[in-house]
Amino acid sequence: MNFISIFDLSRAEIEALIEEGAALKREPKGARMRDDLRGKTLALIFEKPSTRTRVSFEVAMLELGGNVLSLNRNELQLGRGERINETAKVLSSYVDAVMIRAYLHDTVAGFARYASIPVINGLTDFEHPCQILADLMTIKEYKDRLAGVKIAWIGDGNNVCNSLIGGAAIMGMEISVACPKGYEPNKELVAKAEKMGCDVHITETAEEAAADADVLYTDVWVSMGDEDESEQIKNDLKRYQINEGLMREANADVIIMHCMPVHIGEEITAGVMNSTNSVIFTQAENRLHAQKALVLQLVR
Ligand code: CP
Ligand code: NVA
């Protein structure tokens, strides 16, 4: 089984992973060593930088008694033109699973076509499903439910937004996306979510999306790979910020979410990020617990 899209998991599978992740989280830090994955190796391939994804997967494997290899694409023959086809086949004979963070979604999907081991999407231009698994765990932790929870996404309809829409559709949540024209989430993905009964509301007005929201979620204005157009993007997105004013439009017990890294003063203010409503650091922590549950499921 692969985890390339959030749609690869069913509602029951996500619920089980969240439950397992929460149980793993209850084990105190410093007393989490297990040997479930003894003899198993996960390779991590990075085409782009990463703090949370890399470290949480590395610690997850180490605490579960397995091994982990972090590889930069440019250190591999991939960086010199070796095809993904042969790389996938060779790595399948050495390791038990591969996580890839790539520019193009096709790189991860293509790798999976030629691999005979589970492949995990560690972020592409299209989706970031590992992030959303941890986010759903976080929302459950604070709201004690997922079905019926109202999420408002503020900003670029990017990879994280796409996977969040998928997660909302699978778990029976409501989602509104506020973004300027040209920054909408992927149309086919939205259509798929709507076919599952999720009403994905897209608006250009941040206040409209935020009204009565239980969750306010944002991400960087300029994603990795979009740097060449950063001036234009920043200008287009300047009205899409989670600030104190926008927070007042949402429910009083709204939780503030951000996948990190944050750019304070752009998509979020320091006051909101550090407010008692912010669960941003719990999200980051939950990457570890949710991914432990995921790798146990995929490689044990
Ligand atoms: N949220 C997230 O994936 O962070 P990194 O880019 O640091 O891995
Ligand atoms: N949308 C951001 C997420 C970073 C974790 C990016 O792709 O750079």
Image (spheres, grey):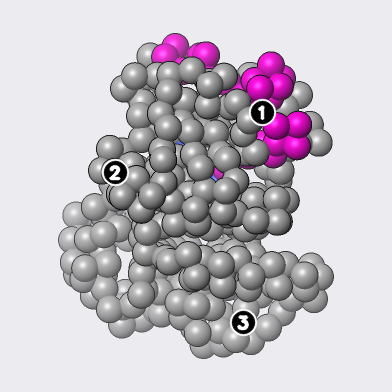
Query: Which label belongs to residue 250?
Result: 1
What residue is shown at x 64% (from left), y 70% (from top)? 19
Is 285 situated left or right of 17 in this image? Answer: right
Where in the figure is residue 111, as x and y percent of width and height?
A: 26, 64
Please state which amino acid type lies under the numbered disc 1: Ala
Residue tagged 2: 191
Dot 1 beta carbon under 8 Å from ligand 2: no
In whole angstroms, how far apart are the C-alphas of marks 3 and 2? 41 Å
Reading the chain from its start, which is encountered first: label 2 or label 1? 2
Please state which amino acid type lies under the numbered disc 2: Ala
- Mark toward the viewer: 3 or 2: 2
| Mark 2 neighbour density, 10 Å: few (under 14) some (14–19) many (20 or more) | some
Tags 3 and 1 in contact by the CB under 8 Å rule?
no
Residue 26 highlighted magenta (yes or no): no
In whole angstroms, how far apart are the C-alphas of marks 3 and 1? 43 Å
Per the rendered image, the range of residues in magenta is: 235-260
Nearer to us in this view, 171 or 27:
171
Q: Is residue 226 visible?
A: no
Where in the figure is residue 11, as x and y percent of width and height?
A: 48, 65
Residue tagged 3: 65
Is 115 situated left or right of 177 in this image? Answer: left
Reading the chain from its start, which is encountered first: label 3 or label 2? 3
In whole angstroms, how far apart are the C-alphas of marks 2 and 1? 26 Å
Nearer to us in this view, 78 or 300:
300
